Amino acid sequence: MKIFFSEGIPEYNSYTFNYGIYCVMEDQSELPEIYAQGFLPYSGSTTLEYQVFYLARSLRVDLDRFADSSENRRVDRKISELNISMQCMEKEAILKEDTAFLPFAHEYARKRIGDSMPEERLQYIIRQSIGSHIFRFMQADQTIGYVLACIKKNMLHYWFSFFDTELMRSHSLGKWMMWKVVRWASDQNLEHVYLGTCYGTKSLYKVRDHKGLSFYDGTGWNQDSKLLKSWCKSDQDRNNGDRFKGKIDQNELIKAVLNR
């Protein structure tokens, strides 16, 4: 793996000279280390010939601390009446035998994601070797959802989900599918499930719904859920400065870094 920095907009008034931080994967065996350092796969450009990752406020479930929450149990009780089954398969097997997958994913992206997920980008994401497995959710002989995931050694990344948009009107289908995959990973004795970024109030459902969470705070994995919630709630109102400059006691942050 190789890490590189891409310069952002300079702000001389606050002495803030930001850089986007990226990682280029050189071998599939590097995936657990890449995720463990806070990186997530970048899919914003469909012309990239390399598998690039970006550093962000990544969220993960540490499965040695995982347990079902009351919200998990509530959602599961309501969905249990639907008798949904889940199957984890290698991506190539799904693409070969399940002709419904691609049209299903395209339709979901059109309805729920919109212009930021044109067909070209979705096809690019599905082709990436990072996505190694697909979870298929079925009710009798009808497919009601899929999850594209990266599974490597001791970790799983819950990358993209696609599900029945009509059924979600009556049931918390997306939340249940995420919990179901986390539970599967726990049963498989994996160590971590990565849930993507965690910014803004729209991400708070991930924080509320799962026990055993930690987030990448720029220096390491932080288990302080109260701090994470406060950051998410204040994301929209922040000025352009970084958190170090906005810290009332900057020495407190430096001490925390040195003690890690």
Image: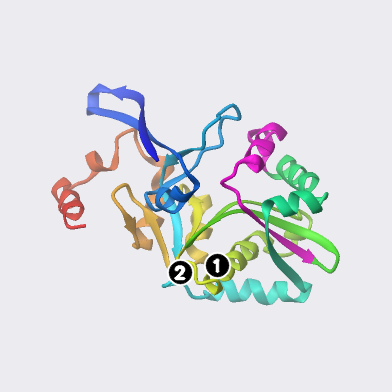
What's the amino acid at mark 1? Ala
Quadrant for the C terminus in the image = bottom left
- Residue at 45%, 55% in the rendered image: 59
Other-residue count near label 1 (Cα within 10 Å), few / some / many at <14 / 14–19 / ≥20: some
Question: Which stretch did the figure color magenta?
Answer: 113-138
Instruction: Inspect this view and state whether residue 1 appears.
Output: yes
Q: In the drawing, does residue 97 fall left or right of residue 56?
A: right
Residue 131 among those drawn in magenta: yes
Instruction: Name the residue nearer the viewer: 42 or 173.
Output: 42
Give the Cα separation between the discs numbered 1 and 2: 8 Å
What's the amino acid at mark 2? Leu
Q: In the drawing, does residue 83 fall left or right of residue 157?
A: right
In percent of width and height, residue 100 lies at 82, 50
> Could you tell which of marks 1 and 2 lies nearer the N-terminus?
2
Q: In the drawing, does residue 157 fall left or right of residue 87?
A: left
Other-residue count near label 2 (Cα within 10 Å), few / some / many at <14 / 14–19 / ≥20: many
What residue would you read off at disc 2? Answer: 63
What residue would you read off at disc 1? Answer: 185
In percent of width and height, residue 110 lies at 74, 40
Quadrant for the N terminus in the image = top left
Residues tagged 1 and 2 counted as in contact (Cβ below 8 A): yes
Residue 156 tag number = none
In percent of width and height, residue 44 lies at 56, 33
For label 1, the SS is helix
Instruction: Name the residue nearer the viewer: 15 or 146.
Output: 146
